[in-house]
Image (cartoon, rainbow, N blue to C red):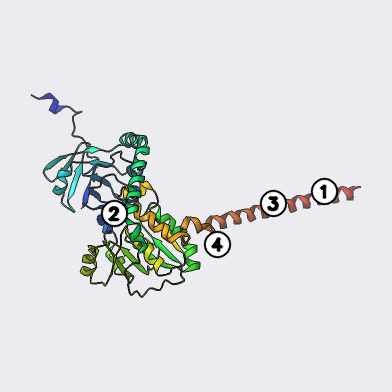
Amino acid sequence: MNWSSLSLFSSKPLPLCKGKISVGAITKVLLRDLPPGRIVVIQHRDLDEVVAQELIDHKVKAVINCQITMSGAYPTQGPLMLLQQNIPIWEAEAAIFQDFIPNSEIVIYEDRIILEDRHISCSAFTREKWLNLQQLANDQSTRLLEQFIENTLTYAMREKKTVMEPLPLLSLRTNFEGKHVLIVSRGKGYKKDLLAAKAFIAEVKPILIGVDGGADALLECGYQPHMIVGDMDSVTDRALSCGAELIVHAYPDGTAPGLTRTNALGVFAHVLPCFGTSEDAALLLAFEKRGEWLVTVGAHTHMIDFMEKGREGMGSTLLVRMKIGARLVDIKSIGVFYKKPYVWTKEACSTVFLSLFFIGLGLFQLHWILKRVTHVVWKLGGQG
């Protein structure tokens, strides 16, 4: 007889997580219409902060990454942000990504995933692993910066003539001349910065441009974008159909992969061949159409921003900013001039009410004390 099988203490390990999965090889495409409460299966090397925040906002249950969640090539807070929100991360081999069936149910244990009748090996990405890789990235940051600068200057030298040439002429219905322009990109902290821009938008009423997913951020805040510029890979169908003027950013040779999507939706889009990023294209377009101030929200401005986008330099961005000059500002720079007027919040009203109550109570007590003193004095005077 196998006594171990009869032991009261023998039991199967409990699952750490289970639920329905959503699968996406391109994370920003998966995020377009991701329902809350899902376990997401992705292939995202070096999980960045913007994507991590999007996953948190979508209230995902867990992340299975069939790629290296953090390589240690550069510092990133992305994985830590998820772990701090109690969203576990498991890593699995890239080869098994194709085995995950969208909308199927899975069960996750400490070192394996149960998918129907299959057992798939996995390992948890822990805070200790993040800390070790973050330290590794910090140790080699000087070498990384040197490579980034060299790449930036190399491409800037190649593209310096291109940036001086005017963009192809587009017949647009949006009139930029003499108006302020707010350009919203999906960069770090873009949602917070857009909320901080409310007073500026209300007072100035600028032209609103969404760069790809930046259009969805505008809609979520209750604004109607005038224009959407981008590759059209991370913006939702809802945004593309909202009535904004659409500009598909094409490669300099005219190839425009984003046009396939707008055609499939049956919406008209202009094609804008332009070097650099879609953010660069939007800035150059607003500049050449004689926008007054070009105000950026969520713009990519430093090395880590570009490394997270898979770019090893920022040559085009450097040239575009040099061309635009003083007309380009970030919302953080001008936000101080557009502070929201003071609003009587519930907490403020409660504080004022309680203050008045205690002042009134104090006056009442003072009145009672004076009345008693007067009565005593009167009695003493009467007795005298």
Callout 4: SS = loop
Q: Earlier in the sequence, mark 4 or mark 2?
A: 2
User: Left or right: 292 with respect to 357?
Assistant: left
* Viewer-side label of 1, 2: 2
Nearest the camera: 316 or 358?
A: 316
Q: CA distance from mark 4 to mark 1?
A: 53 Å
Nearest the camera: 43 or 269?
A: 269
> Which residue is pictured at 38% across the width and 62% down the height?
283
Q: Amino acid at mark 4?
A: Pro
Label 3 crowding class (10 Å Cα cut-off): few <14, some 14-19, many 20+?
A: few
Q: Quadrant of residue 165?
A: bottom left
Label 1 crowding class (10 Å Cα cut-off): few <14, some 14-19, many 20+?
A: few
Give the residue at mark 2: 36
| Residue 89 at least partly seen | yes
> Which residue is pictured at 75% across the width and 49% down the height?
369
> Which residue is pictured at 29% across the width and 44% down the height?
46
Q: Earlier in the sequence, mark 3 or mark 2?
A: 2
Give the residue at mark 3: 362
